[in-house]
Amino acid sequence: MKKIFLLYSMFVFALLAHGQSKLIIKDSLLYTHTDLLTTKSFSVLSLIDTGCSLCVIDSTFAKDTIGLIIEEQERVSVNTKSNRMSICIVDSIRFCGKIYRKVYCIVADLKGTFQRFAPDFILGADILRDRPLKFDCSSLIVEPVKTHRKEGTVLKWKSSDAYSNIPVGYMVFETKIQGESVCFVFDTGSRNNKLPNNIHMEPSGLLQKESADINHQLATQQLRLYKNVKFQIGKQTFTLDFLEGKKEYGLLGLGFLGGRSFILNYGEKTLEILPF
């Protein structure tokens, strides 16, 4: 047992030394271990969520485990143009070998809402946008990228600032499905691909599926299923299965990538899908 622990500790140290973090893929979602530094250091399994503009911490974990001071609700721009939410400040967060200080975090009842799928911490776009990141889904490592020769499929996105009905901080891909204009956002916090709620298509059938979002508790719902839907982003054609969505824009989850690694670059507004 001591030998196993020593080997694991050496592995973690090697990752930190190279500015890398270990990736964990579970339930079609991406996780990594993030260090939250207050008066003590806490290693937290964190959800990597491109669909959340700010970091989010579970309320019970924040108060009872870390002992953070939760401030009164204030108006915050996160996944809506304006909302009142509780906030806190985490002294430091260490991710991919870099320390981010005085990180502004939303406090939410993640455990009560998402139940067994709930993380203690969500790593949002405010951290992910800091530098280009490579998510290697084969070696299960996420690491910063300085310069590299683009060898994969490069998809350009548009900022959600140009759209009145899409939340702040989202990366937007425009396409057409059966002649209808559709906007998709790439959301690694979504377990499923979802169509906009206003698209005119006949479903392939119905599916019982557990679903939740920050405003609705996890529950089993009967949702319309759309199979083998074709669409194009840039010159790349995709064929995916979708569930019905509740918003005016669709969601592309991790399954959209077909298990391939990718590079996320907020500065260039590109998602590069790497070859196997």
Image: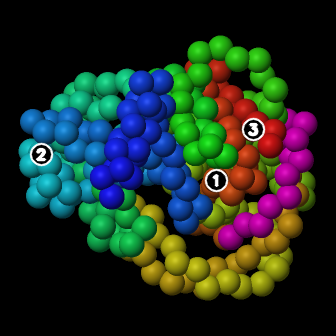
Q: Residues within 10 Å of mark 3 (few under 14, many from 20)?
A: many
Say which amino acid is labelled 3: Ile
Q: Could you say which quadrant of the image residue 114 lies in?
A: bottom left
Q: Earlier in the sequence, mark 3 or mark 2?
A: 2
Q: Which span is picked out in magenta? A: 232-243
Residue 273 quadrant: top right
* Residue in front for this viewpoint, 46 or 112: 46
Which one is nearer the viewer's eye here, 25 or 237?
A: 25
What SS does tag 3 mark? strand
Residue underneath mark 2: 68
Q: What is the C-alpha distance between the residues marked 3 and 2?
A: 38 Å
**Measured from the top left, where is residue 5 in percent x and y?**
34, 50
Task: Reply above or below: 27 against 160.
Answer: below
Q: Quadrant of residue 34?
A: top left
Residue hosting label 3: 273
Residue nearer the viewer, 88 or 74: 88
Instruction: Give me the residue at 27% from left, 63% from top.
Output: 109
Residue extending furthest top?
Answer: 147
Visible in this render: residue 163? no
* Residue identified by numbered label 1: 254
